Amino acid sequence: MQTIARDKDAMGSAIADFQKTGKAGTLRVLSSMFDEDQIPVGYLFRTLGEMPPLEQKAMAMAQGKILDVGAGAGCHALALQEQGKEVKAIDISELSCEAMQERGVKLVQCIDFFDPRLAERFDTILLLMNGTGIAGKLSRLPELLKRTKELLNPGGQVLLDSSDLKYLYENEDGTFDINPLDAYYGEVDYQMVYRKVKGEPFDWLYVDPKTLQLVAEANGMNCELVAEGEHYDYLARLSVK
Ligand code: SAH
């Protein structure tokens, strides 16, 4: 994937605006599968106290040398730094990386998580705000997990959150309109638009905890469900067997 060209970086542009002016326009999220949605840009700047409980739990569990993957505006990296923890933030958005630097994140690198030039090892790898998203498709989840294994110190952990999207397919009688022969129901596509900046469409994977556990096991990792949120979301902790 490499990095995102600035003129195609809708979320990065929104983050840059909010960082400079304290406000931003509408960050629109289009999908071929859902109605148009929006991301409140201020949410990407949330403080520890404003984070959902699952993220607060991840902040408390993160230890040692920490890697924040897809760090966005750097909210988690900043919260961890304030706790005196050592954290490196990476993102493929140059605009987001610049905003993180301006906000005081000490270690920032604009690099794709899958780029082999990222070769340090970490004790905790954070994949937050649907961290499985960057796998894109379920078929690429093993590659994401293998990549975390390469970058973990012995005894290290991956903390990730995701959601079980089955609720989108729930019928009135409580059954689910999901055909196992169709593409996995957590595979979605998005395209972000901010003012005149239109991003490229991209695949984004949500994964249910059971499937995550199966894929983790098959790839030599333990996966424990740490906590469940209020809306089919959960925090998982993975470690190498
Ligand atoms: N973790 C932040 C932002 C989540 S949005 C938060 O919770 O607020 C997802 C972020 O992941 C975006 O900033 C996007 O640019 C970044 N991203 C997507 N694919 C990536 C990849 N392969 N490597 C690194 N960052 C990636």
Image: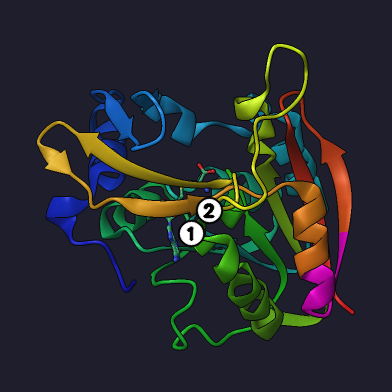
Which residue sits furthest top? Answer: 172
Q: Which residue lies at the image location 23% right of the left edge and 52% below the top edge?
A: 200
Say whether marks 1 and 2 touch (CB < 8 Å): yes
Say left or right for 74 vs 207: left
Q: Is residue 211 magenta?
A: no
Beta carbon of the mark 2 residue lies under 8 A of ligand 1? yes
Q: Nearer the viewer, residue 195 or 51?
A: 195
Image location of residue 155, percent across then percent down = 87, 77
Q: Is residue 176 above or below residue 224?
A: above
- Whether residue 62 is visible, yes or no, is no
Say left or right for 158 vs 36: right
Say left or right for 155 vs 178: right
* Three-letter amino acid code at the position of disc 2: Gly
> Ligand 1 falls in which quarter?
bottom left
Q: Which residue lies at the image location 76% right of the left edge and 13% below the top edge?
A: 173
Image location of residue 212, percent across then percent down = 75, 58
Q: Which residue lies at the image location 77% right of the left edge and 30% below the top edge?
A: 229
Q: CA distance from mark 1 to mark 2?
A: 6 Å
Q: Quadrant of the C terminus?
A: bottom right
Image location of residue 184, percent across then percent down = 60, 51
Say left or right for 66 vs 188: right
Which residue is labeled 1 in the image?
136
- Whether residue 105 is visible, yes or no, is yes
Q: Quadrant of residue 31?
A: top left
**Magenta highlight range:** 216-223
Q: Which residue lies at the image location 59% right of the left edge and 53% below the top edge?
A: 131
Q: Quadrant of residue 197?
A: top left
Q: Is residue 66 above or below residue 149?
A: above
Q: Residues within 10 Å of mark 1 (few under 14, many from 20)?
A: some
Q: Quadrant of the N terminus?
A: bottom left
Which residue is labeled 2 in the image?
133
